[in-house]
């Protein structure tokens, strides 16, 4: 039985040694799952509607599991930071020979198949379950590692049957160390190094600062994988069981059903020494794309390491955001490789992303990091623009242009962070209230109703209205609802009363222009976002919503159903959207500056990316979080609302955006 609690507690070095191994396993599994998801076809004219829907489900499910493996990698990173070490994001290159892990952990890249699904079930099986691996994944040789830590100084590898057993042993080791030396002796790391859901929008990411939070992090990892605890139906193990049964049912109906491309098993980018078990991707038109894909992958990992190593929140958020955007850009490259031949002289197998790693991913010096990585992304852009692409089913011009556009955006973002630049691009600053620019004068359009009074003109934009009813309740003489024709009469209330009514309008549907020389609306002293119960986000700030800077108030959709995204149109009511307006409070450190421009960027098929000083509040006004950068759920599916946890990927959420 695996043990980390012999007569004396394990050393910090021993605990970190096993956390390194855990990080490698989570990272390896993430790559294996992504490879299988990438191998699934995007389209096939031979599919029935039921087959098409199932393949989309396979992709969503496997990708969702891969994202949770990224959660596990981040939680292990937080554990390592808490123990006073740097997180570890490197791993051996595939295929991994016997030795680094117990003999039952066969790690290799293989496309979607029954054998692959059975292997995934085996790897994620609950401890003690009678589940056997597919014969295709039989280990090259059998061996046994140590089963208990001895009193020696050098750290020792342990033997364990399941991932859950490794983490259970780690949990007992952490508890034993704290019992012997005290919790203060173990958790030495700077809390500012921790990454939570506001920085990394992944399902279940939490900070680790003491034994209780460390054990919760481990419990999350085990529960998501094996299904320990109450939520077993959605565990990785049970999701793979469901996929295998679905695939078998389709094959029984139609043995010719092919959901995946014949992606290579054990693909490699460089000519191998042991060619019998490795597929060298040498097609002259495809190998350059493999090179680009691997470079995107490793650059994303560099940014991840920089983010975990940063203590300043804005820098931390920026690096982690760039890392996530690069990972998104990697998806069509991985899918495209699996859809194209590995060799010029024969049609199969197809290629595949090899996830070839770098020798070191240690954090770069802060002074040079942004320039270093921006330079690297610039090389990627130049290479990608020079390559010719012949489309396969499911691809369009936009498939590849979006990859290049994403790289260009991240290069520009990093260039703006470069402290060595002689004339850096201007970075949005958080001005004081007095220096914040006034919102531009609203430009009437055919959808804006204009009602002119003696001292004030009211502008009403029906498309933005969410029927909060402050207008008809607070100024019923001015706003006469359900009245045919003209219905706004500005002179039926004082100017100041109308100004107050407009300021109460959370959506910005009601605005005004003063003609009496009085002050125009000014930005708030504190940027706020209120999470409405079963409803939208109500934001007050000097807003820049996808380039629209015309207002200081807006209600933004968070149910995913609005026909006027990113703005709310009331669809949450008809959709019976249910989401608390009282999310849990995080650790809200005070903001140095509380106002200034708030940039809200809808991410294509993804969340709302918010950058700028912002206080996120419950509907009752309680502070939930204070951030300078965040990703907010707008698909309605996140289990960590209001923050995105990448549930939009599994949900197949679609919406316009950058």
Image (cartoon, rainbow, N blue to C red):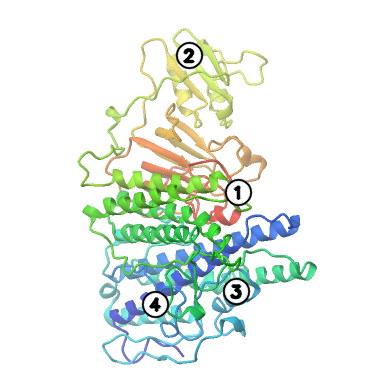
Q: Which type of secondary structure does the marked residue at label 4 adopt? A: helix
The residue at the point 44 percent across, 74 percent down is 25
The residue at the point 63 percent across, 21 percent down is 481
The residue at the point 65 percent across, 57 percent down is 56
Q: Residue furthest top?
A: 454
Q: Are marks 1 and 3 in contact (CB under 8 Å)?
A: no
Which one is in front, 254 or 647?
254
Front: mark 1 or 3:
3
In this view of the protein, can residue 100 be seen by the observer?
A: yes
Front: mark 3 or 4:
3
Upstream in sequence: badge 1 or badge 3: 3
Which one is in front, 489 or 551?
551
Upstream in sequence: badge 4 or badge 1: 4
Q: Which type of secondary structure does the marked residue at label 1 adopt? A: loop
Q: Which residue has dot 1 on it? A: 578
Q: Is residue 379 above or below residue 272?
A: above
Side of 74 where 313 appears, left or right: left
Q: Which mark is residue 21?
A: 4
Q: CA distance from mark 1 to mark 3?
A: 37 Å
The residue at the point 37 percent across, 86 percent down is 157
Q: Are marks 4 and 1 in contact (CB under 8 Å)?
A: no
Q: Which residue has dot 2 on it? A: 457
Upstream in sequence: badge 2 or badge 4: 4
Give percent across and percent down for residue 534: 58, 45
Q: CA distance from mark 3 to mark 4?
A: 23 Å
Give percent across and percent down for residue 78: 36, 66
Q: CA distance from mark 3 to mark 2?
A: 66 Å
Give percent across and percent down for residue 178: 32, 78
């Amino acid at each position: 039985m695996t043990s980390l609690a012999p007569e004396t507690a394990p050393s910090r070095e021993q605990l970190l040694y096993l956390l390194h191994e855990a990080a490698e396993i989570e990272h390896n599994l993430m790559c294996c799952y992504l490879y299988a998801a990438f191998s699934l076809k995007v389209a096939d004219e031979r599919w029935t509607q039921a087959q098409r829907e199932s393949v989309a489900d396979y992709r969503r499910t496997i990708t969702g599991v891969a994202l949770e493996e990224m959660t596990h990698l981040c939680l292990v990173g937080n554990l390592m930071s808490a123990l006073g070490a740097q997180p570890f994001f490197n791993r051996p290159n595939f295929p991994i020979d016997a030795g680094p892990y117990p003999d039952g952990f066969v790690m290799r890249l293989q496309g979607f198949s029954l054998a692959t699904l059975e292997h995934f079930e085996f790897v994620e099986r609950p401890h003690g379950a009678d589940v056997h691996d597919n014969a295709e994944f039989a280990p090259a040789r059998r061996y046994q590692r140590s089963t208990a830590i001895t009193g020696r100084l050098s750290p020792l590898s342990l033997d364990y049957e399941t991932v859950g057993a490794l983490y259970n042993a780690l949990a007992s080791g952490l508890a034993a160390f704290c019992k012997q030396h005290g919790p203060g002796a173990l958790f030495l790391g700077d809390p500012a190094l921790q990454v939570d859901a506001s920085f990394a929008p992944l399902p279940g990411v939490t900070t680790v600062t003491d034994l209780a939070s460390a054990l919760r992090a481990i419990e999350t990892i085990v529960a998501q994988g094996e299904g320990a605890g109450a939520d077993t139906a959605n565990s990785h193990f049970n999701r793979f069981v469901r996929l295998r049964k679905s695939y078998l049912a389709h094959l029984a109906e139609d043995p010719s059903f092919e959901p995946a491309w014949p992606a290579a098993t054990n693909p490699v980018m460089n000519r191998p020494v042991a060619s019998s078990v490795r597929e060298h991707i040498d097609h002259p038109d495809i190998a350059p794309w493999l090179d680009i894909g691997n470079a995107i992958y490793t650059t994303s990992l560099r940014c991840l390491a920089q983010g975990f190593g940063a203590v300043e929140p804005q820098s931390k958020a920026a690096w982690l955001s760039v890392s996530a955007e690069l990972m998104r850009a990697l998806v069509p490259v991985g899918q495209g490789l699996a859809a194209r031949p590995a060799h010029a002289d024969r049609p199969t197998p197809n290629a595949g992303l090899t996830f070839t790693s770098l020798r070191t991913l240690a954090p770069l010096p802060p002074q040079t990091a942004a320039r270093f990585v921006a330079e690297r992304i610039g090389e990627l852009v130049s290479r990608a623009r020079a390559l010719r692409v012949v489309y396969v089913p499911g691809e369009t011009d936009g498939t590849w242009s979006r990859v290049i556009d994403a790289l260009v955006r991240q290069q520009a973002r990093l260039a703006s962070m470069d402290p060595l630049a002689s004339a850096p691009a201007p970075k949005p600053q958080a001005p004081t209230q007095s220096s914040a620019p006034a919102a531009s004068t609203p430009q009437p359009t055919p959808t804006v109703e204009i009602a002119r009074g003696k001292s004030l003109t009211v502008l009403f934009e029906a498309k933005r209205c969410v029927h909060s009813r402050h207008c008809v309740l607070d100024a019923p003489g001015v706003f006469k609802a359900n009245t045919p024709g003209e219905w706004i009469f500005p002179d039926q209330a004082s100017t100041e009363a109308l100004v107050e009514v407009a300021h109460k309008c959370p959506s910005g549907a009601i605005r005004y222009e003063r003609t009496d020389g009085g002050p125009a609306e000014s930005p708030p002293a504190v940027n706020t976002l209120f999470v409405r119960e079963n409803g939208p986000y109500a934001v007050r700030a000097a807003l820049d919503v996808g380039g629209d800077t015309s207002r200081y108030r807006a209600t933004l959709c968070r149910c995913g159903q609005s026909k006027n995204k990113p703005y709310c149109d009331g669809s949450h009511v008809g959709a019976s959207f249910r989401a608390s307006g009282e999310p849990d409070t995080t650790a809200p450190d005070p903001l140095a500056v509380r106002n200034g421009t708030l940039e809200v960027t809808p991410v294509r098929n993804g969340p709302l990316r918010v950058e700028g000083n912002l206080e996120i509040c419950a509907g009752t006004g309680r502070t939930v979080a204070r951030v300078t950068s965040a990703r907010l759920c707008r698909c309605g599916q996140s289990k960590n609302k209001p923050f995105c946890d990448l549930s939009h990927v599994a949900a197949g959420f679609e919406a316009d955006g950058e």
